[in-house]
Image (cartoon, grey):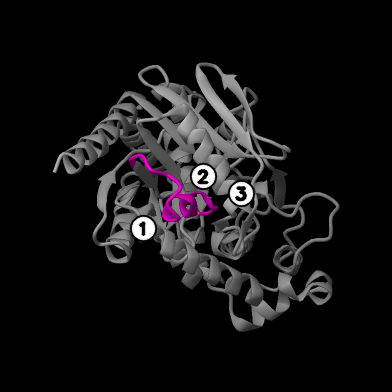
Amino acid sequence: MKVLWLSNSAFVSEKTKATGSWVQPMADQLATSIEMVNITDGIVEKPISSNFKNIKQWIIPATASNYGQEASAETCTIVKDIIEKEKPDLVHIWGTEKFWASIYRKGYICVPTILDIQGLLAPYTEYYYGGLSIKEIFKSIHLKEFLMPTRTLFHKKEVFRKRGLAETVNIKSFKHISYQSQWVKNYISFVNPSATLYPTKIMLRKAFIESQTWAFHNVGDSPIVFSTCSAAVTYKGMHIIIKAIALLKSKYPKIKLKLAGNINVGNKLLDGYSVFLNKLIKKYGLQENVIYLGSLDENQIITHLQEANACVIPSFIETYCLAFAESMIVGTPTIASFAGAMPELAENGKEALFYNSVDYYTCAALIDKVLQNRGLAEKLSENGRTRRMKENNMDTVVKTQLEIYNEVLSYECSISDL
């Protein structure tokens, strides 16, 4: 079998700090059983091919319209030419956040194709403000937004909505779609009821699977709470966890909230939401308590998870949540918002603790509960890691993906024989 991927990232030898970090580990494992080709876009003048281990990789120049959702005719033709040259049995498109799905919708891909849902745009739009009040939204308007009104949260949400409309049109064009959670299946079942849907599994990075398990350590007055997100966006809920930490400071004066990701770092002009977060931190006197870590590689994330007393995932919406799964497999006691697909990853009270997305009081209470109750913390740690080791087992993930490929090809062959 030869499978060609259209994905958002190039495979590299360096440890990645980018999102979508389950894709490369999946490719590494699949390439031991099948022939693989990966196409992604990059800053190149013409298509460039190279080999990454035993995977052929193409990096292409790409242009798109409609907020990046619609590939240009030139980009479509480049992809079509590479597919015709490589002659794959099947094309696998990773995600709807960029223009790859539009290439299929426009008819430039004429071999069996499956779309895998990663993050989604359209359903996220309803949760975009992350529970911020109108007053708080206006407080996020600062110099950058006055200079560039398109940077306001109001405008960003509208762009998100328009991208979601284009995404929906693309999703409706596919016959085969794979999903990572029941939450995604529920959504896709209404958007494209005629598609055949395939449950798939997430491949966690090997470093997390092989990591030393989290061990309980005394809290004192300086516990460490860890959280991470890809960027400072409202629906990731950073303001909720900051408010929760503010409630806990009276009991734990030296509490540390360590935030990983591309959040509020560097010397560039900050966006309004980042300024809002900084003002929130100053309002509650948390300047010494909140630490921005910047983007981290896998080993750095693991180290911070092991050093933390708890991990909090405050997102308002997730189609799966890699950060949640990674925290669980390291064994760090995890507290998460009961939102999107996240309740599917763990059983409340046994493998993680959940709170209502906007309820920072309960978030704070659950953090305190984990800090004070060693038995609970160790139970969550052990049970969480056990579940992830089972559900994210590398052999099971690969077996499932190969079965999906075979099912798609068998279906397409049976249709062509009619």
Residue to which mark 2 is pinned: 310
Q: What is the x, y in percent for residue 364?
A: 52, 60
Q: What is the x, y in percent for residue 16?
A: 62, 32
Q: Which marked residue is nearer to the observer: mark 3 or mark 1? A: 3
Rendered-image quadrant of the C terminus: top left
Check disc 2: other Cα within 10 Å, few if <14, some if 14-19, many if 20+: many
**What residue appears at the point 70 percent right and 43 percent down from the top-left corner?**
293
| Label located before the other in sequence (2 or 3) | 3
**Real-space CA distance between mark 2 and mark 3, rounded to the nearest whole angstrom:** 49 Å
**Real-space CA distance between mark 3 and mark 1, rounded to the nearest whole angstrom:** 21 Å
Rendered-image quadrant of the N terminus: top left
Kindly state the secondary structure of the residue where label 3 is placed: helix
Q: Which marked residue is nearer to the observer: mark 1 or mark 2? A: 1
The amino acid type, in three-letter code, at marker 1 is Ser
Q: What is the x, y in percent for residue 283?
A: 74, 69
Q: Is residue 207 left or right of residue 349?
A: right
| Label located before the other in sequence (1 or 2) | 1
The amino acid type, in three-letter code, at marker 2 is Ala
Magenta-span inclusion, residue 103: yes
CB atoms of marks 2 and 3 within 8 Å: no
The amino acid type, in three-letter code, at marker 3 is Glu
Frontmost residue, 304 versus 41: 41
**Real-space CA distance between mark 1 and mark 2, rounded to the nearest whole angstrom:** 43 Å
Frontmost residue, 320 versus 51: 51
Residue to which mark 1 is pinned: 173
Q: Residue furthest left?
A: 418
- Tell me, yes or no, if residue 213 can be seen here: no
104 in relation to 56, above or below: below
Residue to which mark 3 is pinned: 74
Q: Is residue 379 left or right of residue 93?
A: left
